[in-house]
Amino acid sequence: MLFVPAHVDRFVARAHERGADAVILDLEDSVPLAQKAQAREALAIRAVAVSGHGTRVLVRVNAEAGLAAQDIDAAVGAAVCAIVLPKIDSPQQVLAADRLVSGCEQRLGLRPGHTWLIAQIEDVAALPQLDAIATSSPRLLGMILGSEDFCASAGMAPTPAILFGPNQMVAFACRRAGILPLGFPSSIAEFSDLQAFAVQIALARDLGFVGAFCIHPAQVPVLNAGFSPSADELAHAQGVVDAFENAQREGRGAVEFAGKMVDLPVVLRARDLLRRAAPMPRSTSPGDTSS
């Protein structure tokens, strides 16, 4: 998911060309205060333009309550699939956004639950609230640690060693709640050394993360490669599942496959890999129970 400043026409015009699964039209940090109203007013047109090329559109709103309400009112629409909520440190913030989104959907005649929410965890104060945040709303698709703001709040440097622990806490809370763990244990601002970035994305995948935000187009192919299972991995996962199911039909609870013992935990990981590799329908939303 690639951040694009919502007020910069030339960036928005090319956003769909960057190879990202989704574009986040940003109304928050990348937009100067003096240009926020202008960005908000043009948001609907720009969202339609990006989504018209087949790229999903998300919008990051501002954290301040007054601005957030205006941003959400401008962002909710048929072309926007999710709202990114920055600086979340309590479930009440998510619930307040949920109520605003629900009102906008009703006013626009959108299906209830059309719009997902993603929470950015950006302060140490949020850590004791992670489970409450993760379970606060059926709209909440996932959570992600905002590395720079989080480290600023903690008085820490945004290095991989420092960010490993809080990222793991976010991932665990997401798994407990059944939502998507997003992110990687490194600074989002580091895009000059793509080889080092790829190492961190590989670690993120091992930690169970399924995707992430990025701020530069050069990061997109690294994320796509790092989070996407290879053909060999998919073939191995399918082989694991097939071998185990055959063993079960024969009354066995474990089986040897490719030189390793396969039991239920191994099979569950293989099934999860196959499930995540399947395409996500564009119509999927919190209010869509057809899938």
Image: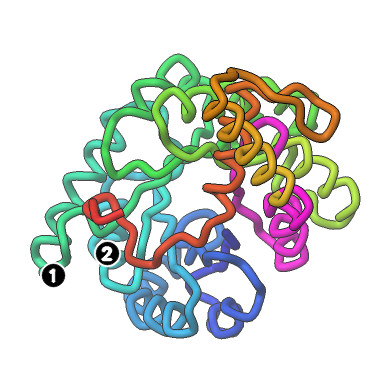
Residue placed most toward the observer, 93 or 15? 15
Identify the residue at image location x=41%, y=28%. 89
Q: Which mark is residue 76?
A: 2
| Tag 1 residue | 108
Tell me the amino acid under the disc marked 2.
Answer: Val
Magenta range is 205-233
**Coordinates of residue 256 in the picture (x, y in percent):** 76, 26
Q: CA distance from mark 1 to mark 2?
A: 9 Å
Residue 230 numbered mark, or none: none
Is residue 82 among the parts visible in the rendering?
yes
Residue 264 occupies which quadrant of the picture?
Answer: top right
Q: What sort of colour scheme is used for the picture? A: rainbow
Residue shown at 29%/44% (left/top)?
Answer: 139
Is residue 227 covered in magenta?
Answer: yes
- Do the CB atoms of the residues marked 1 and 2 lie less than 8 Å apart? yes
Q: Work out whether mark 1 precedes mark 2 in sequence or the reverse, and give the earlier one.
A: 2
